[in-house]
Image (cartoon, rainbow, N blue to C red):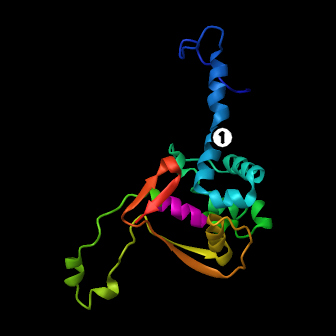
């Protein structure tokens, strides 16, 4: 490509008859596919609503517009809900940003590390004067997501393989990971008890 610097042949060892540039092109061309796979895993309802071709086009617009700042593919979707607020896909489906925000909160809850909870003894020793200035923080695996009713019920309906689009009424949803949540990645499901 123009502006690219040549890579010295002794930096990488390749089989005879294979060019280093060809081998590196595999990695460069695989990058969008890896991002798309990661986004599809975290935004399954958005992908379902859009369909495979429209979701792929969304991913390519997202990659071009939003520089990824983390080496971890799990973080690739961090800006997708806000990106969808201005993306063309939301003109036809205005609930997409809210649906993506809900799915992102679920993905973050799944991967979040737990912090030490507040000790009941600490709460017991607080006086009535302490409570008005007390600050309680949620665990990192907990979030409150403001959304249209359509976004929340769309996610629930998709999990039951329903496709009707529900009516719109604003609401909030609390997302939290139960303490005994266990991922069964081989089966691509989550068991929480």
34 left or right, relative to 48: left
Name the image quarter holding the N terminus.
top right
Q: Quadrant of residue 129?
A: bottom left
Q: Residue at x 74, y 26 (%)?
A: 2
Name the image quarter holding the C terminus.
bottom left
Q: Main secondary structure of the magenta part?
A: helix
**Residue holding disc 1:** 33
**Which residue is nearer to you in this view: 67 or 119?**
119
Say if residue 87 shows up in the picture. no
158 left or right, relative to 126: right
**Which residue is nearer to you in this view: 145 or 79?**
145
Task: Report the magenta residues as a range.
Answer: 101-109
- Spot occupied by residue 158 in the image (x, y as percentages of width and height): 65, 65
138 left or right, relative to 27: left
Q: Is 69 one of the magenta-colored residues?
A: no
Residue at the outermost bottom position: 128
In the displayed structure, 142 sits above or below 68; it is below
In the displayed structure, 53 sits above or below 164; it is above
Say if residue 154 shows up in the picture. yes
Q: Residue at x 76, y 67 (%)?
A: 93
- Spot occupied by residue 144 in the image (x, y as percentages of width and height): 51, 73
Label 1 crowd bin: few (<14), some (14–19), many (20+), radius 10 Å: some
- Spot occupied by residue 121 in the image (x, y as percentages of width and height): 19, 78
Residue at the outermost right position: 92
- Spot occupied by residue 65 in the image (x, y as percentages of width and height): 69, 50
In the displayed structure, 4 sits above or below 80; it is above
**Across the whole image, how many numbered discs are drawn on residues?**
1
Residue at the outermost top position: 16
């Amino acid at each position: 490509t123009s502006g690219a610097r040549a890579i010295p042949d002794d930096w990488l060892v390749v089989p005879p008859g294979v060019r280093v540039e060809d081998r590196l092109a595999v990695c460069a061309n695989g990058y969008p596919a890896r991002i798309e796979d990661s986004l599809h895993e975290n935004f399954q309802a958005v992908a379902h609503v859009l369909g495979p071709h429209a979701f792929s086009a969304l991913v390519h617009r997202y990659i071009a517009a939003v520089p990824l700042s983390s080496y971890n593919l799990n973080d690739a979707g961090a800006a997708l809900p806000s990106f969808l607020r201005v993306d063309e896909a939301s003109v036809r489906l205005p609930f997409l940003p809210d649906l993506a925000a809900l799915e992102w909160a679920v993905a973050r809850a799944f991967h979040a590390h737990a912090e030490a909870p507040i000790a009941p003894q600490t709460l017991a020793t607080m006086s009535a004067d302490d409570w008005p200035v007390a600050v309680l923080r949620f665990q990192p695996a907990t979030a409150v997501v403001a959304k249209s009713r359509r976004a929340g019920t769309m996610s629930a309906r998709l999990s039951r393989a329903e496709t009707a689009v529900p009516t719109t009424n604003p609401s909030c949803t609390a997302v939290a990971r139960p303490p005994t949540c266990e991922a069964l990645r081989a089966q691509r499901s989550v068991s929480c008890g």
